[in-house]
Every structure is written in structure tokens, then in C-alpha cells.
Image (tube, rainbow, N blue to C red):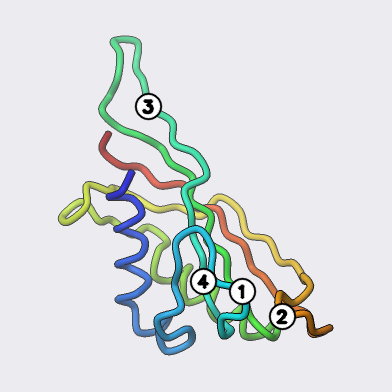
Amino acid sequence: MASVEKSIHTKMAGTTAITDLVSTRIYPFASRQGDALPRVTYFVVSSNPVNASTGSTGTVQSMIQVDVWAASASSAKAVADAIFTALDGFDDTATNAVSYYTLDARRQEIEESDDGSEKPVYRVSMDWDVWHAN
């Protein structure tokens, strides 16, 4: 599992189009309350082995949720678009045994601010199917 999380973090943190927008604010699981916006969080939602009639194929399909948090809808969309461009079809087999990323779903939401103010926080949530070695 760690290789999947390492792969997605390394790809996002190493993509200038993303870091130009969020700097180093890319966090596993959750960010701290009050962290600057925009920011990105990600976590593995599920992992399922891929089996054949003869048993395990040695491949796992994981679902990774990536959330973009921003002060405006346009900022959230810009970061999400940069992440999509970086990850869609990304093959990381050379370094992390992660073979393929595909976008399964994308949602947009407006949430309450975590700093107690009445300013809304805009969120784009993306679910990525990731195929990798067991």
C-alpha cells in the first residue's frame, strides 16, 4: 500500500502545475485545521486483489480519493484540473510498481470553513482507480 501512496504524493509534489498552485500543501489523509488554501489531501479508500480462476494475479486495484480545498470555486477547479492532467493515465511502474491511474468520479461541493468564519470552502473530490502490484 505504501508504494501507492508514495507514488501519488511523489507525482503531485513533483508536478510544477500543481505546486505552483498549492506549494507543498499536499497531505495524506487530512490537513491541519486552518492550513492555508488551496491544499490537497489524499487517502486510499479501498484495495482489492484482482483474481483469476487460477488464483491471485498479483495485481491490486485501489481506489484513492484526492480532495482539493480552496477559497474559490475557480481555484479548486484549477488545482483539480492540474491534478487530472498529471495523473490521468500515469504509469509509475519504473519506480513504484504502480501501473495505471484512471479517474473514476469527480464531485464538487461547498463546505463550511474549518476556521470558524462564515467563508465557504470549495472542494473538488476525485476518485482514482489505481492498478498496482500486490
Disc 2 vs disc 4: Cβ atoms closer than 8 Å?
A: no
Q: What element carries label 3?
A: strand
Label 1 and label 2: CA atoms lie apart by 7 Å
Q: Earlier in the sequence, mark 3 or mark 4?
A: 4
Q: Which amino acid does label 4 sit on?
A: Val
Q: Nearer the viewer, mark 2 or mark 4?
A: 2
Q: Earlier in the sequence, mark 1 or mark 2?
A: 1
Percent x, y of residue 101: 39, 53
Q: Residue 33 carries which label?
A: 1
Q: Earlier in the sequence, mark 4 or mark 1?
A: 1
Percent x, y of residue 86: 39, 70
112 horizontally vs 30: left or right: right
Q: Which amino acid does label 3 sit on?
A: Val
102 horizontally vs 67: left or right: left
Label 2 and label 3: CA atoms lie apart by 42 Å
Disc 1 vs disc 2: Cβ atoms closer than 8 Å?
A: yes
> Which residue is at a point 77% across and 70% down the rendered structure image?
111
Write down the residue under mark 3.
50
Write down the residue under mark 4.
40
Looking at the image, the residue that sits furthest to the right is 118
Towards the viewer: 76 or 117: 117
Q: In this view, does 118 lie above or below 133?
A: below
Q: Is mark 1 on a helix, strand or loop?
A: loop
Q: What element carries label 2?
A: loop
Q: Which mark is residue 115?
A: 2
